[in-house]
Amino acid sequence: MFKAGNIFLKTAGELSLFFSGIIIFTFFAQQKGLIFLLSFTGLILSALIVASHEKSWQALREAFGLIPIRKENVYFIPLSILLAVFFSLLYRYFLKLDIFPTQFISFVIPAAMIGATEELIFRGYIQFRSREFGVIISILIAAITHTVYKYVLFSSLSAIEVVNLGFLIFWTMVVGLILGIMKELSGSCWVPIIFHVVFDILVYGDGAIETWWVFA
């Protein structure tokens, strides 16, 4: 039991450091001048934690959930697309935008890449490493950390007037739980990645929503 406790503490410590690196990057990436460079210390910290634990490409693929979707679970692909369309419609309706984008600008590509990266971090690595605490706890941890990340990202002074933080936090948590469950059931992070890519394309692809939070 003592050994198991040490393993849990080690995992919790590594996850805390990994997530701290993500938060450091998120916060300082929005700063001006040379202080912006501090954001890279966060990325380095997170990368070192991953490198210290995952020793091979196969281990990295498994840790980030880049496992092919099995044939018996292929129905998760259309399901994730349908859910992404539904939530994007809900979000655009809340912001009083056109139901669907009327055009797509060049930002559609980085928007998709950002969504995919978030899923690799939260439903991928964090949820995978948290499984030592149990499946349900791992889904909760992934959803909570993703919500905290979103809060830090959107709660800068320049965003307070344009972002309803209550709405953002609630739906980030709800969708995070749904994606976490889908990832566990499908056995692959490709399912939440597909969701997030489609969602971000439909929400941000036409440039109707200012993307200050990417370039700040």
Image: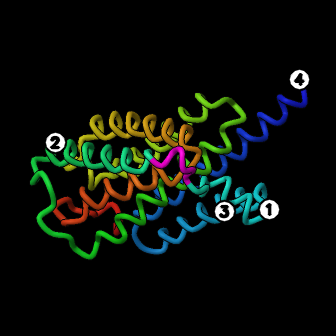
Discs 4, 1 touching: Cβ within 8 Å: no
Residue 9 lies left or right of residue 212; in this view the side is right
What residue sits right under mark 4 in the picture?
Answer: 1
Q: Residue at coordinates 34% horizontally, 33% vertically from top-left?
A: 170
Q: Residue at coordinates 41% horizontally, 58% vertically from top-left?
A: 115
Discs 3, 4 touching: Cβ within 8 Å: no
- Cα separation, mark 1 vs mark 2, equals 45 Å
Q: Residue at coordinates 68% horizontally, 54% vertically from top-left?
A: 62
Query: Above or below — where is 134 with respect to 164?
Result: above
What residue sits right under mark 2 in the picture?
Answer: 94
Q: Nearer the viewer, mark 3 or mark 1?
A: 1
- Cα separation, mark 3 vs mark 2, equals 37 Å
Secondary structure state at the residue bearing disc 1? loop
Residue 117 lies left or right of residue 61; in this view the side is left
> Upstream in the sequence, badge 4 or badge 1?
4
Residue 128 lies left or right of residue 77; in this view the side is right
Q: How packed is label 4: few (under 14 Cα within 10 Å), some, or many (20 or more)? A: few
- Cα separation, mark 4 vs mark 2, equals 50 Å
- Amino acid type of the residue that numbered disc 4 sits on in the rendered structure: Met
The segment highlighted magenta reads 69-74
- Cα separation, mark 4 vs mark 1, equals 27 Å
Query: Above or below — where is 192 with respect to 205?
Result: above
Disc marking residue 140: none
What residue sits right under mark 1 in the picture?
Answer: 55
Asked if the magenta segment contains residue 108, the reply would be: no
> Upstream in the sequence, badge 3 or badge 1?
3
Q: Nearer the viewer, mark 3 or mark 4?
A: 4
